[in-house]
Amino acid sequence: MKKALAIDVGGTKIYNTIIDESGSIISDIEKHSTPKNYNEILNIFRSIIKKYENEVDVVAFSTCGAVNNANNKILGSTGNIAKEYPLTDFSSLSTKPVFLENDANCAAWAEYQIGASKGCANSVMLTLGTGVGGGIIVDGKLLKGKNGAAGEMHFKMRTDKHRKCTCGSWDCFEIYCSGTGLKLTGQEISKKTDITTYDIIEGKESGDAVMTEIFNRWQNDILEGLIGLANIFDPDVIVLSGSMAQFVDTEFLTCAVNKEIVTTPTKVVKAAAGNYSGMIGAALLAFGKDF
Amino acid sequence: MKKALAIDVGGTKIYNTIIDESGSIISDIEKHSTPKNYNEILNIFRSIIKKYENEVDVVAFSTCGAVNNANNKILGSTGNIAKEYPLTDFSSLSTKPVFLENDANCAAWAEYQIGASKGCANSVMLTLGTGVGGGIIVDGKLLKGKNGAAGEMHFKMRTDKHRKCTCGSWDCFEIYCSGTGLKLTGQEISKKTDITTYDIIEGKESGDAVMTEIFNRWQNDILEGLIGLANIFDPDVIVLSGSMAQFVDTEFLTCAVNKEIVTTPTKVVKAAAGNYSGMIGAALLAFGKDF
């Protein structure tokens, strides 16, 4: 059975492990802080690869940022990671074949192969965390677009320039439906600038009326976005992953989405491929390539 | 060279002609009113087919409504057309192979093969008419979704239940960005209930400040929708067709979209495959099938 050295690159942490063709993690998960400096990032990649490349058939990166259609470079800068990061041609980092894909796309692929959307050729996956990531599968293939940047969940929730988004534009789904979005909605409704997502979730669970209103507004914004995505993609399933997904009511969302769409019934479910779905998806995608 | 009998079925009119493999219309365009009654609709289909089926290799329908992935039936009821219309198995209507696809999908395909998105494997086409239709091409294939209903332009422009959409839900792109949407925006801004799209377009062109404000609000709503679609699909091109598309400023839209998106630059252009692009696309799609 083939093996992949899987490496997950995030804005704050880098993880690595070895994954086999069944999607099983077959070695320890190693963890590193993501350095601010470009050469230090490359040095971490090089030391991981040097240590493991002889044990594996392929090196598979799951990374923040949009990845090109040749799966060897990222496009443009991404969050707080070193600005030179897009310069890297990842294929030069190992003597083995190297495969690179966006982390949300990798996670969506893991869900499709071994998780919540297993066997569903048409799915939309949203990672609800500090931001929102998107991975879309159309007819059993990742939606990449002309340059690999597709699947960005920056569509508008309103058109009156109410809330500035991290992308530089206004009122995107991400800035309402992420953890950051929940906090901002909390600030708007409660008028408290120091409110946290923890306050809101705890308050809602203990029956506080204002916190419940905030949570429901946030969950309703998610619903409104899912209605649009279901009408655009007619997906078998919409998968919610990420740290904030645990709090949403997928039964409510499934029912409410199906009441509003003009396409055929879909379902909203939580992700099931686990915390390391990015690395698993990267490995499974890499095995599917002819190197 | 193969020939198709192409039939376009709309809520008010049915057209038919013969189209060859190059996408050329090689006979007269015939026009019929769409009857309210189901059997009368079928009788029109039967008489057209009886007259021409011996001259052609395939019968290709472009129809209002979502079409299934087997391309022989429509899903659910569609606008003001007979409720029984979805019962029809179109393959039973001719001794020749029959192909059926949604009209906006057909038009998008015609643009991809011979029109404004020729050679672009990733495109989004919007028909701005009384309503809004959508046809999306991903990696050179029509986006159909699990059951064929994908590409519906019913995503939200706001989330406060301001304007009821024809689909039964609220505040969809269609109800702001169609001709109907322009009229409703005109009513809201001018406070005149009898305002027409003609008043708005004429007024804007002669420099009336209120009519210009209405038009710009409408065009800006289109812009906001296009930003979301560009971020979701990373398309080569966004094609605007339909009777309302002639009024929009595609240079302005291209520039404004590219300023706001996180994906790679795209362009907004007007359709170029002509008024009968639905029939042309249906024929070209039909030729591509192995019958």
Image (cartoon, coloured by chain):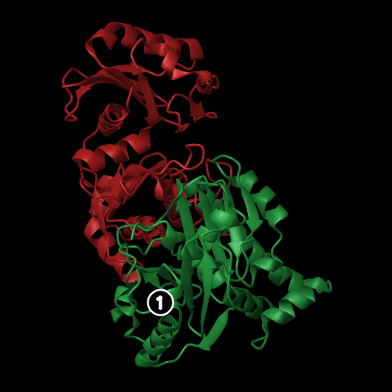
Chain colours: A red, B green
Q: Secondary structure at mark 1?
A: loop
**Residue A127 visible in the current orientation:** no
Residue B132 position within the rendered picture, expressed as x and y whole percent measured from the top left: 53, 69
Badge 1 crowding class, 10 Å Cα cut-off, few under 14, some 14 to 19, many 20 or more, is few
The image shows residue A72 at horizontal and vertical percentages of: 44, 24
| Displayed quadrant of residue A22 | top left
- Please tell me which residue is depicted at 51% across the width and 70% down the height of the picture: B279
What residue is at 34 percent from the left and 60 percent from the top? A234
Which quadrant of the rendered structure holds the C terminus of chain B? bottom left
Left/right of residue A140 with respect to residue B216 in the rendered view: left
Q: Which residue is mark 1?
A: B168
Which residue: 34% across, 86% down?
B83
Label 1 chain ID: B
Total count of labels: 1
**Residue A284 position (above or below residue A136):** above
**Compared to B11, does A265 lie above or below?**
above
Residue type for callout 1: Gly
Q: Residue at x 21, y 20 (%)?
A: A3
Vertical relation: B245 (above or below) A77: below
In the foreground, A32 or B172: B172
Question: Where does the image place residue A254, in percent across and percent down from the top left?
Answer: 26, 61
Residue B266 visible in the shown view: yes
